Image: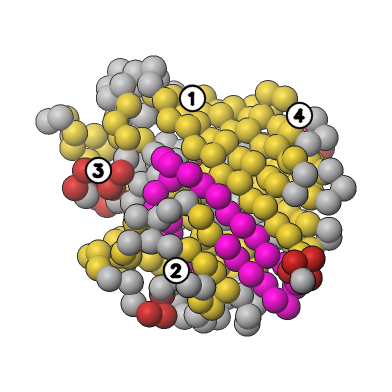
């Protein structure tokens, strides 16, 4: 079991990783948690009980009908979790190989062969590093299928939600939710869900996609004297905001594409990759103590 857990620690920042799902199990800054370990259906939860973040690869969220058509080819995928829809890709449900590991950096690899009925075959890499007060996570995917396929990347971190938690994130519009937790229609962002100027996370059911994101976000926890800056430049252009009603966590999920993008115009931002082509996306988490700013 010890070989399955990787610790990165520079004295200020500490991140606990698992090779199961290439997941983050916990993270703290000067002893204050910056992530909220939560039970999920991912592989790390099955092995360790909880996950604090896991990657989306070769794409994220749900695929309606577990099938899509591209260039007159119809492709099908089998449900892979407790959801009736194929959910969150394969990476979170697979054991990754540890390529390298030091006190402040780690690299994990996952090679996925085509398993019927899915056409997806790919290589994925995830690099973690801690430098100063910053965690950097770089996720990549390379198509190894005989087909050109739509692919995307993302992250599903769980953050603590306190009464005073505030989120600042600018986007152009958001999507309502329909049956089976699929995106419905895009439109103007309602006031209680508009975080451009900073807003508290409401204690209500949230499961909304946002598009036209500028790749920057700030989470503040006044009760914890903690602030977290998130930077996720292009190809990240979207995020999901998820929180069960009255839960003590919420999820701010950077994505390169919209959920169910296979069935949306322009593939919802998914990238069509030929054999050998790849996609790379980097996210940084930079915590700081609010009291240090005064």
- Tell me if label 2 and label 3 are in contact, CB under 8 Å: no
In which quadrant is the C terminus drawn? bottom right
194 relative position to 54: left or right: left
Q: Do the numbered discs 4 and 2 sit on residues whose CB atoms are within 8 Å?
A: no
Residue at 43%, 45% (x, y): give it: 236
Q: Let me know if residue 47 appears in the view.
A: no
Question: Hey, which residue is sitting farthest left in the picture?
Answer: 72
Q: Residue at x 49, y 37 (%)?
A: 281
Q: Residue at x 34, y 55 (%)?
A: 212
Residue under label 3, please give it.
267
Is 223 included in the stretch rendered in magenta? Answer: yes
Name the residue tied to disc 4: 101
Q: Are marks 1 and 4 in contact (CB under 8 Å)?
A: no
Towards the viewer: 102 or 75: 102
**Residues under labels 2 and 3: Cα distance?**
26 Å
Identity of the residue drawn at 36% across and 29% down? 120
Q: Nearer the viewer, mark 2 or mark 3?
A: 2
Task: Give, as a single range, the part of the protein colored magenta.
Answer: 218-245
Tell me the crowding category of disc 2: few under 14, some 14 to 19, or many 20 or more residues within 10 angstroms, Cα based.
some
Marks 1 and 4, Cα distance to the nearest angstrom?
Answer: 19 Å
Residue mark closest to the camera, 4 vs 2: 2
Considering only order in the chain, which callout, 2 or 1, is on the residue closer to the N terminus? 1
Left or right, 162 with reference to 173: right
Q: Are marks 4 and 3 in contact (CB under 8 Å)?
A: no
Q: Is residue 226 above or below residue 98?
A: below
Q: Secondary structure at mark 1?
A: strand
Mark 4 Cα shell of 10 Å, populated few (<14), some (14-19), many (≥20): some
């Amino acid at each position: 079991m010890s070989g399955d857990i990787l610790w990165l620690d520079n004295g200020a920042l500490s991140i606990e990783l698992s090779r199961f799902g290439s997941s983050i199990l916990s993270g703290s800054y000067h002893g204050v948690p910056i992530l909220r370990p939560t039970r999920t259906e991912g592989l790390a939860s099955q092995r360790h009980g909880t996950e604090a973040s896991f990657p989306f690869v070769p794409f994220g969220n749900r695929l309606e009908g577990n099938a899509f058509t591209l260039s007159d080819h119809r492709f099908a995928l089998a449900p892979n979790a407790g959801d009736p829809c194929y959910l969150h890709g394969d990476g979170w449900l697979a054991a990754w190989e540890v390529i390298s590991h030091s006190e402040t950096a780690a690299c994990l690899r996952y090679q996925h062969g085509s398993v019927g009925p899915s056409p997806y075959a790919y290589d994925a890499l995830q690099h973690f590093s801690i430098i100063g007060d910053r965690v950097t996570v770089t996720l990549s995917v390379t198509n190894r299928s005989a087909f050109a396929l739509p692919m995307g990347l993302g992250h599903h971190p769980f953050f603590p939600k306190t009464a005073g938690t505030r989120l600042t994130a600018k986007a152009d519009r958001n999507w309502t939710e329909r049956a089976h937790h699929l995106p419905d229609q895009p439109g103007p962002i309602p006031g209680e869900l508009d975080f451009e100027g900073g807003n508290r996370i409401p204690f209500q059911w949230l499961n909304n996609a946002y598009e036209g994101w500028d790749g920057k976000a700030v989470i503040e926890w006044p009760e914890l004297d903690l602030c977290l800056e998130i930077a996720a430049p292009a190809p990240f252009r979207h995020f999901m905001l998820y929180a069960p009603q009255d839960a003590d966590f919420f999820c701010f999920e950077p994505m390169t594409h919209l959920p169910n993008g296979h069935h949306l115009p322009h593939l919802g931002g998914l990238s069509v990759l030929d054999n050998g082509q790849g996609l790379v996306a980097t996210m940084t988490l930079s915590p700081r103590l609010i009291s240090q700013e005064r």
